[in-house]
Image (cartoon, grey):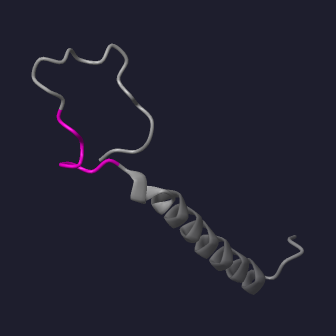
Amino acid sequence: MSALTPQQIVTMTEILVVLMGIGITWAVYYRSDQAELPGDAREPPPGEPDDALPDTRGRTL
C-alpha cells in the first residue's frame, strides 16, 4: 500500500509536470539572445583561409 492517496498522487504529478515544463522552457530560452542566427554571421573575405578549428561554442539553429 502507498502512504499517499490517489488524489495526492495526481496532485503531485500535476505539480511535477508543471515544474518540468518551466524547467524545459528555461533551458531552451536561457541565453538564447546570444545565439547566432542565420544571416547574422560575418562573411570572411574571399582570400582568407578557413579556420583550422571552427568555433563550436554557443547555440546555432
Placement of 58 over or under 46, stated as above or below: below
Would residue 40 be counted in the magenta stretch? yes
Q: Residue at x 37, y 17 (%)?
A: 53
Farthest residue in the left direction? 46
Q: Residue at x 68, y 80 (%)?
A: 10
Placement of 12 over or under 21, stated as above or below: below
- Residue span colored magenta: 36-43
Would residue 28 be counted in the magenta stretch? no
Q: What secondary structure characterizes most of the magenta part?
A: loop
Image quarter hosting the N terminus: bottom right
Residue 48 location, quadrant: top left
What x and y, as percent, mark residue 4?
Answer: 84, 78
Q: Is residue 28 left or right of residue 15?
A: left
Q: Residue at x 70, y 83 (%)?
A: 11
Farthest residue in the bottom direction? 7
Q: Residue at x 12, y 17 (%)?
A: 47
Placement of 43 over or under 27, stated as above or below: above
What x and y, as percent, mark residue 46?
Answer: 10, 23
Say how many tags the image has: 0
What x and y, as percent, mark residue 8?
Answer: 77, 83
Residue 43 location, quadrant: top left
Foreground: 31 or 23?
Answer: 31
What x and y, as percent, mark residue 42?
Answer: 22, 39
Q: Is residue 45 left or right of residue 3?
A: left
Foreground: 59 or 48?
Answer: 48
Q: Is residue 2 left or right of residue 61?
A: right
